[in-house]
Image (cartoon, helix red, strand yellow):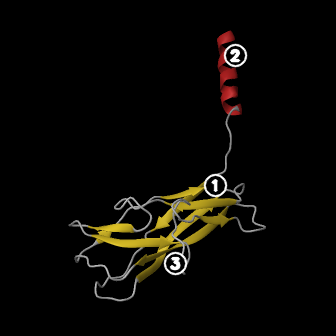
Amino acid sequence: MKLFRLIVILCILFFITGSARAVCTMSVTNVSFSTYDVFGTAPVDSDSGRVNISCTSDVNRATVTIGKSTTSSSFNPRQMKLATGTDALNYNIYTTSARTAIWGDGTGGTSTVRADRPSGKPQPWTSVLTMYGRIPAGQNVSIGSYSDHITVTVTP
């Protein structure tokens, strides 16, 4: 009989010590650029990237950071690598369409982006943030497909 009571007490303690916490989830749509012309004089811009955030009602804001380029290990410039070679194409991701603040982790002159829960919205909420990309003009690179991998983080 004592063993049975001990098991019941352990089960009750397990359920009592559980806790709820604030949670945000996200999904990301890639930044896709149009064809880059090495003879072009204007940068190639994109606003196709999205960070979709969904947070529980107890989260008032979430901070979104974007990591360094895996190709160049830096924020400025980030670089895409040629799929079948060694060429690298400079680019960056910005916080607004003016493309003046590099979206990063708040270090090295970069900025983060904050998503705030809309006022009067106590239930779970969502936010969609746009990533504004730019490839500067005047880069002499080989023809081919270029890509980079970066990490996007949402912190409630």
Residue 156 is labelled as 1
Residue 5 is labelled as 2
Query: Quick check: 18 above or below 129?
Result: above
Which quadrant of the figure contains the C terminus?
Answer: bottom right
Left/right of residue 105 with respect to residue 88 in the rendered view: right
* Residue shown at 43% from the left, 81% from the top: 45
Percent coordinates x, y for residue 51 in the rendering: 53, 67
Percent coordinates x, y for residue 8 in the rendering: 68, 21
Q: Which residue is mark 3?
A: 99
Q: Secondary structure at mark 3?
A: loop
The mark nearer the N terminus, 3 or 1, is 3
| Residue at mark 2 to residue at mark 3: CA–CA distance | 65 Å
Left/right of residue 55 with respect to residue 91 in the rendered view: right
* Residue shown at 43% from the left, 77% from the top: 134
Percent coordinates x, y for residue 144 in the rendering: 24, 75
Q: Nearer the viewer, residue 70 or 13?
A: 70
Look at discs 2 and 3 and give the one toward the viewer: 3
Q: Amino acid at mark 2?
A: Arg
Which quadrant of the figure contains the N terminus?
Answer: top right
The mark nearer the N terminus, 1 or 2, is 2
- Assess disc 1: are there few (<14), some (14-19) or many (≥20) residues with their C-alpha within 10 Å of its C-alpha: some
Look at discs 3 and 1 and give the one toward the viewer: 3
